[in-house]
Image (cartoon, rainbow, N blue to C red):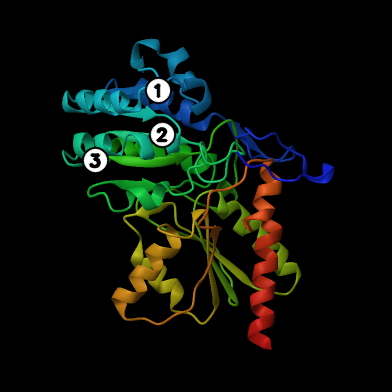
């Protein structure tokens, strides 16, 4: 495992930290776990399953509140998905949780053939997506969306904050077919409730308007896009933010509408720039026969270093400061 050379100024989190909230932010602790408890109390079909990671995926909240509705499968991700498939076939609504890397890399065939081919209502809710841990490639799911986007019947959700997670859980349960949601765990920021926002499965939402720059974001990068837009406003750059929480199916109608205006456009994602949000939008434009420049902001096509998360976010260009720098640099290039 390689490591990043870290200066004392940058050492503000340890390598395994999965809580990205700042000390001054409004947060909700374990929003996934509490949302599942609330749903399970209303619907006796709702169950939780863990691959020995309940404490680290926030399913311990459901385990402790409703132990009869929780199954500990152990460190066997294939068995986790096989058990979830069997429960779904019997009419239950399972939420199966592990780390994103294990669900996608180790158990792909079981997700594909046991669950997706049968179009079962199994909901994979997986922690540590993208760059949310500094433990290096063994735990950084930087390519999970790319792995899964080609799977038929599967809906893919990348929530921005606790609001997204809380509102997504009952909609995933009600959805006809399998889902995969990248989960933020621990103390998760509350951001979107300040913008009159409501999560709708399959829909993108314009969170902030702006006439000069459009940031199309998904997952935790929406928070950074909003922070960047505020900083850019102080620099005199009017910046819009379009949040895309559902990556498959993509809300092409809304995205096309926002791309119809003459603005500098960047995509922002906590995922490799290959196979995620940027590629999905570029694919749409090619199918439409539309020529439009879009600049991707995301993780590089490489295995990432281990280290402190703030250091890594800066290194790979996905921090708020680096996003602002990228926009201003593109603006200068346009004006040159």
The answer to whether the residues at label 2 and label 1 have Cβ atoms under 8 Å apart is yes
Residue that sits furthest to the front in the current view? 1
Q: Mark 2 = which residue?
A: 102
Secondary element at tag 3: helix
Q: Mark 1 = which residue?
A: 51
Which of the 4 image quarters holds residue 335?
A: bottom right
Residue 173 on image: x %, y %: 31, 35
Residue 116 on image: x %, y %: 22, 41
Secondary element at tag 1: loop
The quadrant in which the N terminus is found is: top right
Residue 336 position (above or below residue 118)? below
Q: Residue at x 35, y 16 (%)?
A: 71
Q: Residue at x 45, y 64 (%)?
A: 278
Residue 233 on image: x %, y %: 70, 68
Q: Residue at x 36, y 41 (%)?
A: 180
Residue 286 position (above or below residue 143)? below
Q: Mark 3 = which residue?
A: 112
Q: Nearer the viewer, mark 2 or mark 1?
A: 2
The answer to whether the residues at label 1 and label 3 have Cβ atoms under 8 Å apart is no
Residue 140 on image: x %, y %: 52, 41
Closer to the chain start, of discs 1 and 3, is 1
- Left or right for 199, reference 95: right
Secondary element at tag 2: helix
């Amino acid at each position: 495992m390689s490591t990043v050379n870290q200066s004392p100024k940058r050492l503000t989190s340890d390598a395994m930290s999965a809580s990205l909230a700042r000390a001054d932010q409004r947060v909700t602790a374990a929003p996934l776990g509490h949302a599942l408890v609330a749903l399970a109390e209303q619907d006796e079909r709702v169950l939780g399953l863990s691959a020995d990671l309940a404490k680290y995926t926030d399913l311990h909240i459901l385990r402790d509140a409703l132990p009869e509705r929780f199954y500990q499968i152990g460190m066997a991700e294939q068995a986790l998905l096989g058990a979830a498939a069997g429960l779904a076939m019997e009419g239950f609504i399972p939420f199966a949780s592990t780390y994103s890397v294990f669900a996608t890399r180790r158990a792909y065939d079981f997700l594909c053939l046991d669950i997706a081919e049968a179009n079962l209502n199994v909901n994979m809710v997986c922690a540590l997506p993208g760059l949310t841990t500094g433990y290096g490639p063994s735990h950084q799911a930087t390519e999970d969306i790319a792995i899964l986007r080609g799977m038929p019947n599967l809906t893919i959700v990348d929530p921005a904050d606790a609001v997204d997670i809380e509102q997504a859980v009952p909609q995933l349960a009600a959805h006809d077919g399998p889902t995969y949601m990248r989960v933020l765990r621990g103390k998760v920021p509350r951001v979107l409730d300040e913008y009159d926002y409501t999560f709708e499965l399959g829909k993108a939402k314009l969170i902030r308007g702006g006439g000069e720059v459009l940031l199309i974001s998904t997952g935790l990068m929406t928070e950074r896009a909003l922070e960047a837009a505020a900083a850019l406003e102080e620099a005199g750059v009017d910046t819009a933010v379009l949040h895309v929480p559902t990556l498959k199916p993509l809300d092409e109608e809304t995205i096309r509408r926002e791309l119809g205006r003459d603005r500098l456009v960047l995509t922002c994602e906590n995922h490799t720039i290959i196979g995620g949000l940027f590629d999905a939008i570029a694919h749409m434009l090619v199918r439409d026969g539309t020529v439009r420049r879009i600049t991707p902001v995301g993780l590089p096509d490489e295995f990432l270093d281990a280290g402190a998360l703030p250091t890594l976010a800066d290194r790979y260009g996905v921090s708020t400061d680096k996003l602002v720098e990228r926009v201003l640099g593109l603006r200068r290039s346009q004006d040159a």
